[in-house]
Image: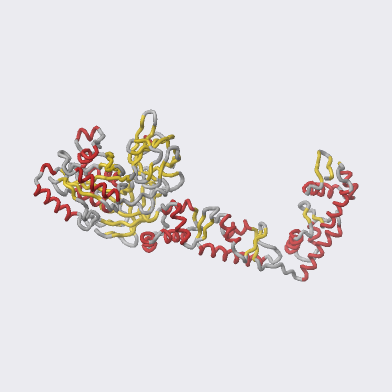
Amino acid sequence: MLHCIVGTAGHIDHGKTALVRALTGIDTDRLKEEKQRGISIDLGFADLALAPDIHCAFIDVPGHERFVKNMLAGVAGIDIVLLVISAEESIKPQTREHFDICRLLGLRRGIIALTKTDLVDAEMIELVRLEVEDFVRGSFLEGAPVVPVSSVTGAGLEQLKCELAKLARNLPPRPTDQHFRLPVDRSFTIKGFGAVVTGTITGGQLKPEDDVELHPLGLKLRVRGVQVHGRTVPRAVAGQRAAVNLVGIDHQQVRRGMTLTAVGAFADTKLVDCLIELLPSARPLKHRAPVHFHAGTAEIEAEIRLMDRNEVKPGERAYARLALRQPVLLLPGDRFILRQFSPVVTIAGGEILDLAPPRKLKGGQQRLKILETSDPTERVKLFLAESACGMSLRDLIARTGLSERALKDALSLSGVIWLEAQQWAVSLDWFRQAQQKTRQALAVFHQQNPLKPGLNREELRSREFPQVPAFLLDAVWNSSPDIAAEGELLRLSTHKLALKQEEENALRKIEDAFRLAALTVPSAQQVLQSCGVDSARARNLLQILIREKRVVKVSDDLLFHPSALSSLRQILSVHKGQRFTVAEFKQWTGVSRKYAIPLLEYLDRERITRREGDLRIVL
């Protein structure tokens, strides 16, 4: 089944609502005030089966200039615009403004309906047709079907349906593989069900029992049920209008302009870089001018900050930054409308290029030119080059709006480093620079500490890479053949301990002192003080002996030669399976309590003995 969204556009009282009612049998004026005043105030909705395989949803927008903001909330997500122009009055002010809005939003398909043809003669219809064709010349509606219709007599309705069906069959598919996104245009409650929100799904798909997130509130909610055109469905997809029954929220907490999305997929923003196009009819737009910003179903006050210029002239395009008064969910490629602050009229439109721009404003045109014109691969490379140490897949999806598949395709072509286990990407330049920075740090360390085997990983990370995730540094160090990792220590693979003659002599003295002392060793401090080198080098020499297992650290201040511990094992071996006291151990070994307790604790750790209350057993 093909689905399409058709939005009306046109001046007040040109017959938009009457035409939708004639096509669908549904009156889209649902408010009491609309009935009383005879004009549309808010968005109205209807649907129609254009063919057995085509279902069309209509969004009927108000035509009065006071309600253009409501019109903007409805027209942003449509596939086809139905520009309605009265054959009695031809082109009027809101015809022009609505048409400008459609063009600025990047709409590409539409039909023009000449309404109220039952009130004029054929000559007038032809005259208005010529005016309309001249009006849309050079736009996306140039060459579009112009269909004279009457909602009273039904004339032309079948032809209009046929033209709509033709356009619907040629629509490009909506991106169902992206993360789910639905800008909310209505919220209400149904007794027995609770909160319901409606909107057009602009990406992804939604099913009952899915978890969703409501932006900008950040609330995590559960979907109880989904309807499309009043029918409960197992799944709603991009390009369909859907009603979503939510669990965990009151409908009064939800307002137009909020967005439902997949949980954790996207982030709100208050600062965006964009490309704007000022209408030829607008006044010059000055730096830091206040504007009304409309995107999706949201309307937010904003300040425009121009790049390297003080104003944009009518008809010009320019790069700019928008500082939004409130956070909103946007994605790159989203189209928007700017309206003047006072008087409130449409002045410009544009496209979102970046959701998290760098602080520096001046000189940003080249960067935005890349974001505007380049393919996803180049945009991803730019974001990674600007990042401190790469980005997670989740952050890249939120920053680019790409689906996971499209993003991984872009990463595969961009020559970046991709860590599959952690779903993390980093630029090749950063990776190489991190390797070089590590090599330099290790070279300095070895020069300053020739007797130390290497630099502690955590010390190096905290000193040189304080913000970098540990897994990323591990990848940097493990992939470099000239960096050797030994437990928690890192060294250059070319680094070898080269002892001076006096250090060789001191090393032998330290080892001999522990070997000759057997089980009654002096303190480490005593041994180091008499080895013949300064205390700093002596401590390093002792660490070499410990690392090479030429002495064994039994307690903080007691170290033993391996030969002494081997003799101790032999002494205990003749008592295997026997329980003994500390006193008996002292008698067997000839050591005092000063040595007996640390040695017994060492033997327990080595599973040579096991403590059982006040006794021990030889295992």
Q: Quadrant of the N terminus?
A: top left
Q: Nearer the viewer, residue 43 or 448?
A: 43
Q: How many marks?
A: 0
The image quarter containing residue 57 is: top left
Q: Nearer the viewer, residue 364 or 6?
A: 6
The percent coordinates of residue 111 (x first, y second) are 22, 49
Extreme residue toward the front, this view: 52
| 114 versus 375 height, above or below | above
Extreme residue toward the bottom, this view: 501
The image quarter containing residue 611 is: top right
Q: Is residue 181 left or right of residue 92?
A: right
Q: Quadrant of the C terminus?
A: top right
Q: Is residue 346 left or right of residue 323?
A: left
Q: Is residue 334 left or right of residue 61?
A: right
The image quarter containing residue 216 is: top left
Extreme residue toward the top, this view: 192
State how the image is colored. secondary structure
Does residue 580 appear in the picture of this structure? no
What residue is drawn where x is 62% and y is 56%? 458
The percent coordinates of residue 189 (x first, y second) are 36, 32
What residue is drawn where x is 45% and y is 47%? 265
The percent coordinates of residue 250 (x first, y second) are 40, 34
The percent coordinates of residue 105 (x first, y second) are 29, 52
| 221 versus 481 height, above or below | above
Does residue 334 appear in the picture of this structure? yes
